[in-house]
Amino acid sequence: MRYRSDHFVAHGSLRDIVVLDADIEDWQQMLSSLASSFWEVFLSVDFPGEPQETPVDARRLFEELESNSDASARLEIRVDGVSFRCYFFQSDEIEFTFDPIEVQDETSFQAVVQFMTWLGDLCGKRVIMTMETAEHAAIPALLDYVPTSVGRVMALLRMGVGERGWV
């Protein structure tokens, strides 16, 4: 992937990094891997009236979030100065949000690449970066990471409307 400053212009909109078509096993794999992560990880789970479990069980987490309007969960992973935040909106999509102002050059862009690569390899699924939205599949991806079945990685970068460049 190559750094393009126009993908990170701070004009009030955040950026989303998303695993589409995720399942509860993807969530559990991601949550379980955090204990061995070398990044700064902050996880807050609040189920009123119940003690917090560590490690977090993904299935129970989503069941509690769906059934209890007072329950909340937040995950933040800091990678080389870029903070990726997850609020556990839906179980069929792993979504992290970050502020594009944190990505100012090739060096900070590598944090985004590293995070997308980690997430895609961990889940074995495509990871995209889009403008902040609730409909990720409906808009063009700014960055696209696809792990291959043989373990190599293809990095795809949207070069313009309707064009896709191989890097």
Image (tube, rainbow, N blue to C red):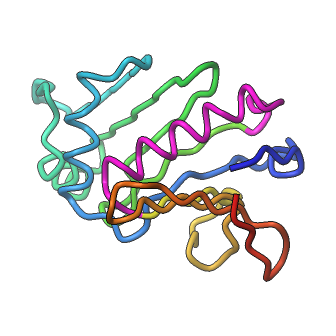
Residue 153, position in %: x, y? Answer: 48, 55
User: Quick check: 87 above or below 74?
Assistant: below
Magenta segment boundaries in residue numbering: 100-125
Picture residue at 71% right of the left edge, 47% below the top: 14
Depth check: give the residue in front, 82 or 64.
82
Residue 151 percent location from the top left of the image: 35, 55
Residue 15 within the magenta-colored segment of the rendering: no
Q: Is residue 109 magenta?
A: yes
Q: Quadrant of residue 30?
A: top left
Residue 125 shown left or right of residue 158 in the figure: left
Q: How many labels were placed on the picture?
A: 0
| Direction from residue 48 to residue 95 in the image, left or right | right
Q: Is residue 45 above or below residue 161?
A: above
Q: Residue at x 87, y 44 (%)?
A: 5
- Along the viewing direction, whichever of 56 and 46 lies nearer the viewer: 56
The relative height of residue 158 versus residue 66 in the rendered view (above or below) is below
x then y, percent, for residue 62: 22, 53
Between 166 and 77, which is closer to the camera in this rendering? 166
Looking at the rendering, which quadrant does residue 74 occupy?
top left
87, above or below 16, in the image: above
Quarter holding the C terminus is bottom right
The image quarter containing residue 104 is top right
Residue under the point 20% across and 32% down: 48
User: Is residue 28 left or right of 143 when viewed as pictured?
Assistant: left
Q: Position of residue 27 (x, y in %)?
A: 26, 50
The rendered magenta stretch, by its main secondary structure, is classed as helix
